[in-house]
Image (tube, rainbow, N blue to C red):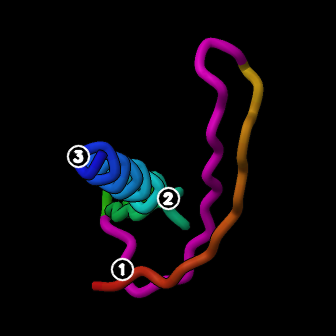
Amino acid sequence: MKSLSTLCGVLVAFFLSFQAIAQTPQGINYQTVIHDTGGNIVANQNIGFQLAIYKLATPTERYEETQSAMTNS
């Protein structure tokens, strides 16, 4: 009986560890280099950009956001 209760305790701890691992991230980290139409790096300027995520194999847009940022050197 003692080994059964130990096994149940181990299984509970095992499943609780999956709950902690399965959290959804709060954002997507990204980094890029911005070039103008001439291929020159755009440094120290305000830019605007749009990110869209589409469902695979269909033109259905799932998520879209527009951001603005200041580029660095």
Q: Which amino acid does label 3 sit on?
A: Ser
Q: Do the residues labelled 2 and 1 touch (CB within 8 Å)?
A: no
Whichever of labels 2 and 3 marks the residue nearer the N terminus, that label is 3
**Residue at horizontal 31 percent and vertical 43 percent from the top:** 4
Nearest the eye: 50 or 10: 10
Q: Residues within 10 Å of mark 1 (few under 14, many from 20)?
A: some
Return the residue at label 3: 3
39 lies left or right of 69? left
How crowded pointer 2 is (Cα within 10 Å; few <14, some 14-19, many 20+) is rated as few
Residue 23: x and y, percent?
50, 58
Q: Which residue lies furthest to the front in this view?
A: 1
Side of 13 relative to 46 (left or right):
left
Type of the residue with mark 2? Gln
Residue farthest to the top, as pictured: 57
Image depth: mark 2 or mark 3 in front: 3
Q: Which residue is drawn at 61% across and 12% down?
A: 57
Residue drawn 32% across the image and 62% down it: 33
**Residue 46 position within the rendered picture, expressed as x and y whole percent measured from the top left:** 55, 82
What residue is rendered at 42% in x and 62% in y? 20
Q: Can residue 58 be seen in this view?
A: yes
The residue under label 2 is 23
C-alpha distance separating marks 2 and 1: 36 Å
Q: In this view, does 71 lie above or below 59?
A: below
Q: In which quarter of the image is the N terminus?
A: top left
Residues under numbered marks 1 and 3 in contact, where contact means CB atoms less than 8 Å apart: no
Is residue 36 shown above or below 56?
below
Q: What element carries label 1?
A: loop
Q: Which of 33 and 24 is in front in this view?
A: 24
Q: Name the residue under label 1.
A: 43
- Mark 2 or mark 1: whose residue is earlier in sequence: 2
Local SS, label 2: loop
Q: Which amino acid does label 1 sit on?
A: Ala
